[in-house]
Each structure stands twice: as C-alpha cells, then as structure tokens.
Amino acid sequence: MNTFKLTNKINILSILAVLAYALLIISSIIDGKEDFTLGFNAARYDKESKSLVGHEIHFVSLKSKSGVAHFPETIEGKLSDIKYPAKLTTIKVIRPTEPEVDKQIIAYNIAGVLLIILYIIIIVLLPIHFFMLIGALKRNEIFSSNNIRMVRFLGFELLSIYAISFCINYLEFKTNSILFNFTDYEIARAQTNALFLVLGIAILVIGEIIKKGEEIKTDTDLTI
Amino acid sequence: MPIIVNLDVMMAKRKISLNELSNKVGITPANLSILKTGKAKAIRFSTLEAICKELNCQPGDILEWAEVE
C-alpha cells in the first residue's frame, strides 16, 4: 500500500515536472518569437561578397546617466494632457552589418555562440537526468550511487545555466559598450536571475543528504 | 577491520555447513556468508545469540579483536 502511494506520488510529480518544463519552453519560445523572427530575417551570409549582409539585432540594457531619479523620456497621458517622465531600461537595436565594426566584436560573437550551444546542451540534458532519477525512484532505488550522480549532475547543470547566463549578459554588455553611445543613458549589464544559482546549490545539498542516506543504508544492509 | 570473525573455524569444528547453519539461525545464506567473510558492519545480539546457541560456543569464540598495523 505504501509502495503504491509512493509510486502514485512519483507519477504525479513526474507529470507535473513535464508540464512545468513544457510551459517553460513554450513561454520562452513565445517571448522570444519576435526576437527570433527578427534575428532569422536579419543577417545572412552573402557568398559573393563573402560577408554577413543585412542587420543584426542587439538587446541593450540601459540606466540613466544622471542617477535613479533621472527620467529623460516623456510619455503622454491618455486621460489628460499631462506628459509624464519616463525612462528606458531595455531596448532592441537593429544595426546594419558593417565589416570593419563587426571585426571588433567578432571574438565576443564567437564566445556568445559557443555559450549558447553549451546552454542548449544543458537544457536538453536537464530533463534527461531528471527523468532518469524519477525512473530510479519508481524502481524503489532511492539511496544509490547512480541517484547521487544524477542529483549532482542536476545541481551542476543548474549552476551552469546561471554561469552561462551571467557570461552571455557580460558579453552583450561588452559588445553594446563598443557599439553604442546614448546621450542620456549608459549601457548597463543585464541582471542574471539568481534563482538557478540558489536551486543549483540546494540540489547539491540534497545530493549530499542522499549520499549520507546511502552510507546509512549500506551500514543497515550489512548489519546481520 | 580490527574485529575478526572466526565463524568458519567454529563451523568446521562443529562440522556444520553454511546452509544448514543459516536455516537453523534464521538468516539467509547470503547474510551468513557476509558475516563469515568479515564484510559485515555490525551484528545484532539476537543473531549472535542464535549462532552461539547453534554452535554451542561463546561470542569470544566467534569474534576476536586484533590490532591492525
């Protein structure tokens, strides 16, 4: 009966995990659809001139040059004639490809592409390792060396997601600092969501708890 | 491990096999083998009592402490 309840709980949790992960992927696709379409149509390699032609899209984070209380823009009120102060925090810039300019940022672009490839690999591995862990739990293997390994993989994958996002934001910041200049704003580095950092550390702690559990189980199994 | 299990010696003296002893004591042959080969981490008093009763010996006849250098 207890095993049946545990199996049911694991089944429900695994279904919820699939739905949550699917929702995450779908919402990322929907949020990024416009950017993807812009980027897909923006730049292409021209064989004749042997260079990128078209445009590149840049995502730029901004902060006011004169401090947090400075609102350089204005926006008209809809219900009155008053103009309200406003400021921009993120913008998208379409920049035509310029070979001489692109040469200066090529290193950042290459690094960015490599990081994105790594990011995609981790995004694919994360659910695989998670469902391997779920499969082991369904077989009633809880405190095993394989599970400890899976949990550690999950922890390091989550930490890697944070690290890669941090690096991508830094590369964007460096690229944008080279390319753009604003009168009222300075280029800012986009904030990286520390949730993955916290989750990764928490998962690694759980891994250590499972390791301790494995040691206790071994002692119990070898108590005659 | 400093605790040496001399179960095989006592079993030879009493001329009893592993399977026979495991049936009489009420533990599996696999567990008894773990104990005999010194791989066990601990032994319950109830198990020790059952073994001593079947082999008609003292716990000291089965368990021995030797300093590991």
Image (tube, coloured by chain):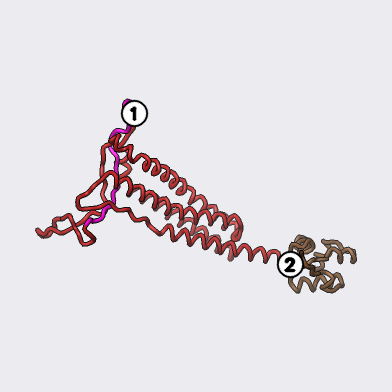
Chain colours: A red, B brown
Across and down, in percent, residue B50 comes to 80, 72
Crowd tier of the residue under label 1, counting other residues whose Cα lies within 10 Å: few below 14, some 14–19, many 20 or above: few
| For marks 1 and 2 on the same chain, the one whose residue lies earlier in the sequence | 1
Q: Amino acid at mark 1?
A: Lys
Residue range of the region highlighted in magenta in the rendering? A47-65
Q: Is residue B2 left or right of residue A47?
A: right
**Viewer-closest of A113 and A207:** A113
Where residue A138 appears, as percent x and y from the top left, is 57, 57
Tell me where residue A50 sits by quadrant: top left
* Label drawn at residue A50: 1
Find the residue positioned furthest to the left: A81
Which chain letter matches label 1?
A
Residue B34 belongs to magenta span = no
Q: Is residue A46 above or below residue A26?
A: above
Inspect the image, locate mark 2, and give the three-letter code of the amino acid beneath it.
Ile
Which quadrant of the view contains residue B40? bottom right
